[in-house]
């Protein structure tokens, strides 16, 4: 699965590059689905660097195996769709979209030495 594919499904990246365009060294692809469940639970997808699976959980950075409710192969698109359907079914269905977050356009003055 590519970043473009996940974005086309409605996933939004949660880790952003720094101002130079570089990602953090220990970068894992982390995405949040653009709709919450009816009970307010968010859906996160993470692809840790060097691991051939995507992990789905209700927390942005799951630390224990109990926090991960599904693991699907990187190229298993039907498996991802099935895991998402099971998640929303377990949480009462698909709820409201995530609230829009306006990014600040404020940029502090930088001195040129």
Image (tube, rainbow, N blue to C red):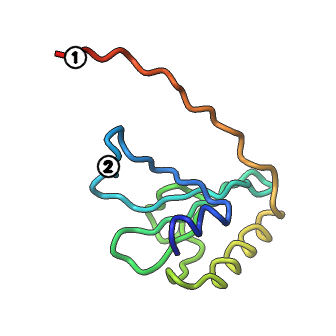
Q: Dot 2, how many residues are within 10 Å of its Cα: few (below 14), some (14-19), or many (20+)? A: few
- Residue that numbered label 1 is attached to: 112
Residue plotted at (81% across, 50% down): 96
Viewer-proximal residue, 68 or 94? 94
Where disc 2 sits, the SS reads loop
Between residues 76 and 111, which one lies in front from this camera angle? 111
Classify the position of the C terminus by image quarter.
top left
Task: Decide if residue 54 is on the left or right side of residue 69.
Answer: left
Determine whether label 2 and label 1 are within 8 Å by CB: no
| Other residues around mark 1 within 10 Å, as few (<14) / some (14–19) / many (≥20) | few
Residue in the picture at 65% in, 64% down: 8
State which tag comes first along the sequence, 2 or 1: 2
Q: Which mark is residue 38?
A: none
Expressed as whole percent of the image width and height from the top left, the position of residue 60 reads 52, 55
**On the picture, is 102 further left or further right than 23?**
right
**Above/below status of 98 relative to 44:** above
Residue 22: give its label.
Answer: 2
| 35 and 106: which is toward the camera | 106
For the image, the number of numbered tags is 2
User: Mark 1 falls on what kind of element?
Assistant: loop
């Amino acid at each position: 699965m590519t970043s473009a594919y996940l974005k086309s499904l409605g996933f939004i990246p949660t880790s952003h590059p720094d101002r130079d365009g570089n990602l953090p060294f220990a970068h894992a692809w982390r995405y949040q689905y653009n709709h919450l469940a009816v009970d307010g639970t968010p859906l996160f997808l993470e692809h840790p660097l060097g691991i051939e699976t995507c992990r789905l959980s209700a927390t942005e950075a799951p630390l224990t195996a109990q926090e991960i409710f599904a693991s699907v192969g990187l190229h298993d698109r039907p498996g991802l769709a099935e895991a998402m359907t099971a998640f929303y079914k377990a949480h009462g269905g698909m709820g409201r979209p995530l609230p829009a977050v306006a990014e600040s356009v404020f940029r502090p003055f930088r001195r040129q030495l």
